Image: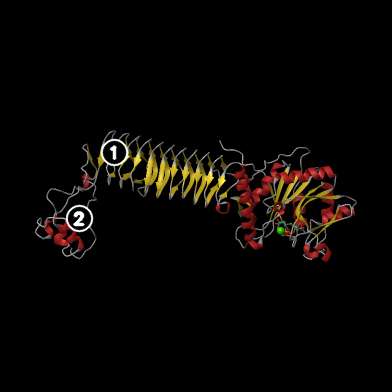
Amino acid sequence: MPVSSGLPPTSTFEGEPVSAVVILAAGEGKRMRSSRSKLLHEIAGRSMLSYAVDAAAALQPEHVVVVVGHLREQVEAHLAEIAPHVTTVVQTEQRGTGHAVQVALAALPDLTGDVLVTYGDVPMLTADTLVALVADHRGARTSVSVLTARVDDPTGYGRIVRGAGDDVLAIVEDRDASEEQRGIDEINSGIYVFEPQTLREGLAQLRPTNDQGELYLTDVVALAREAGRTVSAYATADAWQTEGVNDRVQLARMNAEVNRRTLEAWMRAGVTVVDPATTWVHASVDLAEDVTLLPGTSLEGATSVAAGATIGPDTTLVDVEVGEGATVVRAHGSLAVIGAGASVGPYAYLRPGTVLGERGKIGTFVETKNASIGAGTKVPHLTYAGDVEIGEDANIGAGVIFANYDGVTKSRTRVGRASFVGSDSTLVAPVVVADGAYVGAGSTVTGDVGAGELAVSRGRQRNVAGWVARKRAGTKTAAAAEAAGASLAAGAGDGSADVAPDAPVPPPEQAQDVVHAPLTDQAVVPPGPDRPNTDERES
Ligand code: UD1
Ligand code: CA
C-alpha cells in the first residue's frame, strides 16, 4: 500500500465563504522569451497557472476569476481543460494590477464576502497559506490583509511600510521608494484579502501617479488608511510561497525547490533516494515504503511504486504502476503496469498498454506496446512486442519480432501459456501460437500453431565441404581449416557444384514448414546463398 508522502494536506476552508478569488494573469511575461504563455510553463509537470487555480479552489469561493490578457487564447484553452469552473475576464490593455482587479470586479455581481487577490505565476503558494491569510484577516478584523515575507534581497518588490504599532501604512513600489524605504526587507507578495467595500472604494480612487503610469493595486492600502481603515500584514516564514517566476532561471530554481521538498517528504516516509539532485518526482506520484530510487530517475503523472521496488538508474516512468519488489533499470515507460517481482531493463521501452505480469521479465533492448505479458513470462532480449498477448510462463527468445503492422492495419498476436518462441523468429500478425507450443529459432510464422506443435520455417542448413579451400585458398581461414583436418576433396572448384545435393533450399511456398519431429542440432542457419559474406568479387 502506498503511504502518505507527508506533504502538507490540502486544507478546506471553514467559516464564512470567500466571495471571490481573483487571479491576475494578464501580464506579458516578457522575460520568459517564449511564444508560450508564461503561465503554461510547468513546475513539477503542471502549469504554473494550475497551482494558482487549485489553491484558489481549495477555499471554495463563490467565484474564481482569472484575469487574462497576453496570449489569452492559450491561457483560456488551458483553463477550459484543467478548470472549466473558473471565469476568465479579459484585460485588453495591461494598465496595472489595480486596473486588472477593476476589470475582474466589473465582471462579477456585487460581492459581500472577502475578496482574495493572487497571481497566476506564484506556483508555490499553498491553499494552507491562503487559508491562514484569510483566518488572520478575520481575526485581526482589518479591511485589508496582505501576505508578506522577509527576504534577503527585496530588490524589485513592493516594500511594506509599517507604522509604530506594526500596522501597515502603505506599500511602496521599489521604483517609487525612498532610499530609506528600499532598506525594508519585508516585501509585498501581491496576495491580499480585501473587505469588498474597501476594495471597491479604493479601486475607484486609483490614479496612475507613479513611475510606470499604471493603476497600482498596492495603492488601495494607503487609500484604505486615509479612509480610516486598518490594514494588517501576515508574514509567511516560507518566502518561496510568495515568489513569482519571471524567467527560465527562476523556473528551474523553483522546479528544483519543489522537487527537493517532494523528495524530502518521501524520504521521511520511507523511500530511499540515492541522489536527490538527479531524481525527479512529481507531486502526483505515489510511493510506498522501502522503494529505492536510483540516480537519474524521473517519476511523473499517475505513477505509483509499491513497497520494495527499485527504480533506476536512468529511468523515466510516466503513468506507470510498479508492483511490489519489482526492478526497473534504465527504462522508459508510459501508461504501463509492471507486476510484483517483475524485472524490466536494462534498456527497455514500455509504451502505452504494456502489462507485465508478476515475476515477468522485459529485458534488454525490448520495446513493448499494447502488450500483455503473463506472469512468469520472459521477454529477455532484443524484441519488439506490439499488439500481443502472451500467456503465463512463456519464453520469448532473443530477437523475436511481433510484426503487428502490414502498412495499413495493426493486428494482434497471441502466444499461449508456457509456449516457447525461438530466437530470431518473426510472428506475422494476426497469428496464434497455442498453449504449450514451440516455434523453432529463425522462423517466420504466418499461420497458427496448435497446442503441442513445433512450427519451424526456414531454409535447411547445408554444409558445402571443401568450400573454404576452393574459394578462400591462402587465407588464414583456409589454413585453420587445413590444420583442423578439413577435407579438400568435395567439389571441383567450379561454382556450379556448390549446391550440396542433400540440402535443397525449400521453395518459398513452404516458408512455414510445420514439423512434428525435433529439430536436429544443426538446424539453425538462415537461408541464402552459400557465400558467408557479401563479397561480390567472385560472382
Ligand atoms: C507587484 C506589486 C508589488 C509586489 C509584486 C510581487 C503592484 C503595483 N506591485 O509588482 O508590490 O511586490 O507584485 O510579485 O501591484 N498583471 C495583470 N495586469 C496588469 C498588470 C499585472 O494581470 O495590468 C498581473 C501580472 O500578470 C502578474 C501580476 O499581475 O501576474 C503582477 O504584475 P507585475 O507586473 O509582475 O507586478 P510587479 O511589478 O512584480
Ligand atoms: Ca512580478
Tell me if mark 1 has few (under 14), some (14-19) or many (20+) residues whose alpha carbon lies within 10 angstroms of its own. Answer: many
Residue 204: horizontal and vertical position, in percent? 83, 54
Q: Circle 2: is it few (<14), some (14-19), or many (20+) Cα within 10 Å? A: few
Element class at badge 2 = loop
Q: Amino acid at mark 1?
A: Tyr
Decide which of 82, 337 is in the foreground and name it. 337
- Residue at far front of view: 483
Helix or strand or loop: what does disc 1 sit on?
A: strand
Q: Position of residue 201 (x, y in %)?
A: 85, 51
* Residue 391, numbered label: none
Residue at screen point 49% across, 39% down: 325
Residue 471 falls left or right of residue 1: left
Q: Is residue 429 left or right of residue 301?
A: left
Residue 40 visible? The answer is no
Find disc 1 in the rendering and name its residue. 438
Q: Is residue 330 above or below residue 153?
A: above
Rendering coords of residue 347 (x, y %): 43, 50
- Which quadrant of the figure shows ligand 2? bottom right
Q: The residue under label 2 is which amino acid type?
A: Pro
Number of numbered discs visible in the structure rendering: 2
Query: What color scheme is it?
Result: secondary structure
Q: Residue furthest right?
A: 228
Q: Where is residue 463 drawn, in percent x and y?
A: 16, 51
Find disc 2 in the rendering and name its residue: 529
Q: Is residue 227 left or right of residue 399?
A: right
Q: Is residue 423 above or below residue 216?
A: above
